[in-house]
Amino acid sequence: MSELERIRLFLSVEHVCGYLPGRASRNAFIDPEFPLTPARYGWLLEQGFRRSGVHVYRPYCQHCMSCIPARIPAAGFQANRTQRRCLSRNADLSLKVVHRLNEEHYALYRDYLLSRHAGGGMDAHNREAFHTFLECSWGEVRFWEFRAGRRLQALAVVDETPRGISAVYTFFDPDETRRSLGTYAVLRQVEDARQRDLPHVYLGYWVPGSQKMDYKRHFRPLEVLMHGGWKPLPEDDG
């Protein structure tokens, strides 16, 4: 048995589900004492785990299995008409990859939360919570700045591993919803993975019935982790 197969897991207490109304959820967390690295995290992504800050988890709900790990096979991805229009609409944006969060990023994050998630708990985030949520001491974390001229339009938080990249979180100017910047960030991440021969872009969890997670099914082909293995999501699913 390998060291990775001997990782201890800790269950959280139940809390209100953030995706499906009227449901409770809980997570299984990797032992915080386990020494994580980008390579080990890449293996855990393949097992359906995800990180929030330095903590790695996957949903472990007693009566629900709606949170389904999803990833895009970069080499086989084909943008649909809507996604091609998204790329064209944002052709004026520049991309710069940085290694640290700053005050400009935090200001955009606050504006985004107040617009998109007001009253949902996340709007209470202060600077410390912002850094705790997005940064990771053991990971290869990159912050992708998308700008129109000098104006920051969006920031995508991306984890790099030898097995692929993980789209951690994207936030954007709430006045620029017409740009579909969340979709645009994923499209650029797929392009980056393909150029570097990385096999997958991990999207976290697809949750059928959740409006905020529904966009993930539009990236095709899409693979989902179900019944013990990664399988293509049928075109008529979702």
Image: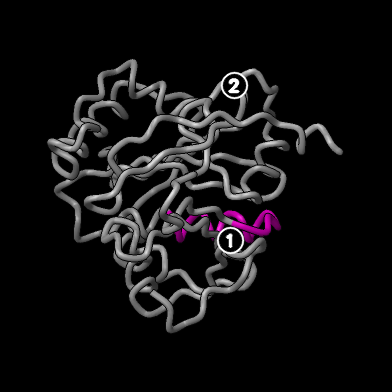
Left or right of 101? Residue 17 is left
Q: Which mark is residue 32?
A: 2
For the rendered model, the colour scheme is: one colour
Q: Quadrant of the C terminus?
A: bottom left
Magenta-highlighted residues = 186-200
Tell me the quarter of the picture where residue 111 sits.
top left
Counting from the top left corner in percent of width and height, residue 185 is at 41, 53
Looking at the picture, does residue 170 appear above or below residue 135? below
The residue that mark 1 highlights is: 225
Report how many numbered discs are placed on residues in the image.
2
- Image vertical order of residue 85 relative to residue 107, above or below: below
Is residue 12 left or right of 74 when viewed as pictured?
A: left
Residue 48 drawn above or below residue 3: below
**Which residue does the image show at 67% across and 27% down from the upper left?**
36
Task: Give the prevailing secondary structure in the magenta stretch.
Answer: helix
Front residue of 113 and 179: 113
Residue sitting at the far bottom: 236
Q: Residue furthest front?
A: 63
